[in-house]
Image (cartoon, grey):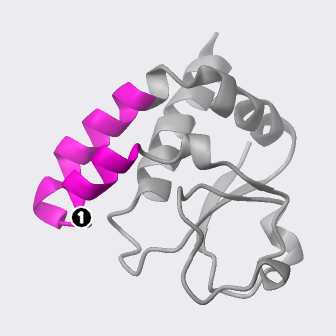
Amino acid sequence: MTIAIKRIYDPPAKSDGYRILVDRVWPRGMKKEDAALDAWSKELAPSTALRKWFGHDPARWEGFRHRYASELDDAAEHWRPLITQAARHRVTLLFGAKDEEHNNAVALKSYLDALLKAHAVR
């Protein structure tokens, strides 16, 4: 049960497993044929309003994580297949942000890891 995160600008690797872009907008300067995606899930990305509010401001990180988790709570039909996939194979969440510590893929991974952990306990 592995979920990883990676910048979409980093070269794809076989070890990435299932590669899914979790940004609402296509990453600047990235050609679709170079992305080596298995899927692009705009629905797993934060809403446009939340993304603009956050603005990649580390001071808003905790608030962003909580608001994004609330959005994800209402989007189970989009993240549930990733949980199933991650239970069997490695899943790599791809993102375009420059900040590798404060972005939606980091928050999504944390959210999904908590679900996987809770599911494993049951």
Q: Quadrant of residue 78?
A: top right
Q: Is residue 53 magenta?
A: yes
Q: Main secondary structure of the magenta part?
A: helix
In terms of image quadrants, where is residue 104? bottom left
Seen in the picture, residue 57 relative to 87 is either above or below; the reply is: below
Which of the 4 image quarters holds residue 116?
A: top right
Q: x and y percent of residue 94 in the render?
A: 62, 65
Tell me the quarter of the image containing the N terminus.
Answer: top right
Relative horizontal placement of residue 86, taking residue 73 as reference (left or right): right
Residue 55's x, y, as percent? 24, 64
Rendered position, 60 above or below 26: above
Q: Nearer the viewer, residue 80 or 90?
A: 80
**Residue under label 1:** 55
> Label 1's element?
loop
Instruction: Name which residue type carries label 1.
Output: Gly
Residue numbers of the magenta segment: 47-71
Q: Is residue 54 magenta?
A: yes
Residue 21 image offset from top left, x and y in percent: 66, 60
